[in-house]
Amino acid sequence: MRILSSSNQIFVISAPSGAGKTSLVDALLNKDTNIVGCTSHTTRPIREGEIDGENYHFVNESEFVNLIKNNYFVEHANVFGYRYGTSELELENTLNAGLDVILEIDWQGAEQVRKVYDNCSSIFILPPSLSELEERLRSRGKDTPEVIKARSQEAVKEIKQCDNFDYVIVNDDFDKALRELVTIINSARLETGKQLLKLAPLIKNLVRDA
């Protein structure tokens, strides 16, 4: 496990499709300029309205496999037949720039990141019910009925992973869920270990002047 000499934090956030994870992360990033996301690589086909390099780095299967062989990813996983991965270089460059990072990844990737970094907090987003989850999947109009059925079935397996996370939020009310997410971020930043690193000069002066 890597112990970084930095007060900056990695947050991994996971959820079944349709739980509202992306909307919560987007709202958080609009509120907090000290935390940023990482643009994942994926083999998934680009969708209408998406921008390569902004929504994802879109690559083909052979390119993704080569990146794995070159140890490019800090985490990667196969989700619904497509590969997703997070660049280790981009992650560490962001931390070294003095920013916190939030990774919107599935539970497999979250597990990998937790094993590598000691400065990682994990958050799982639950839907209020499976019926509501299915309705959200239908209403967003991105998937066929067959895909929606597969995602709903997979959601039960994903939800079983929530007890491996540090925090759990139920997204039954978006504003409430966002407040809880912001509270988690701020609480993690105030942990003693991180504050000792961040406030070392102040603490040194306070002790010296006592």
Image (spheres, helix red, strand yellow):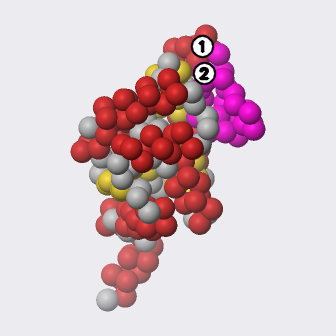
For label 2, count other residues whose C-alpha is less than 10 Å away and answer few (under 14), some (14-19) or many (20+): many
State the residue at coordinates (50%, 18%).
Answer: 81
**Residue 51 lies in the magenta-colored region:** yes
Type of secondary structure dominating the magenta stretch: loop
Q: Is residue 73 above or below residue 30?
A: above
Task: Check residue 119 in the rendering and tell me which mark sits there, or answer none.
Answer: none
Q: Kindly tell me whether residue 137 is visible in this rendering.
A: yes
Q: In which quadrant of the rendered image does the N terminus lie?
A: top left
Task: Provide residue 105's location: percent of width, then percent of height.
Answer: 47, 38
Task: Provide residue 168's location: percent of width, then percent of height.
Answer: 32, 53
Residue sitting nearer the eye, 161 or 154: 154
Q: Give the extent of the magenta segment.
A: 38-60
Say which residue label 2 marks.
43
Helix, strand or loop for disc 2:
loop
All told, the count of numbered labels is 2
State the residue at coordinates (65%, 34%).
Answer: 56
State the residue at coordinates (51%, 14%).
Answer: 69
Task: Provide residue 104's location: percent of width, then percent of height.
Answer: 50, 43
Q: Is residue 176 above or below residue 40?
A: below
Relative to 51, 129 lies left or right: left
Q: Earlier in the sequence, mark 1 or mark 2?
A: 2
Mark-to-mark CA distance, 1 and 2: 6 Å
**Residue 89 lies in the magenta-colored region:** no
Report if the CB atoms under discs 1 and 2 are less than 8 Å apart.
yes
Say which residue label 1 marks.
61
Extreme-left residue of the structure: 163
Helix, strand or loop for disc 1:
helix
Extreme-top residue of the structure: 62
**Amino acid at pointer 2:** Thr
Q: Is residue 73 above or below residue 183?
A: above
Q: Kindly tell me whether residue 117 is visible in this rendering.
A: no
Q: In which quadrant of the rendered image does the C terminus lie?
A: bottom left
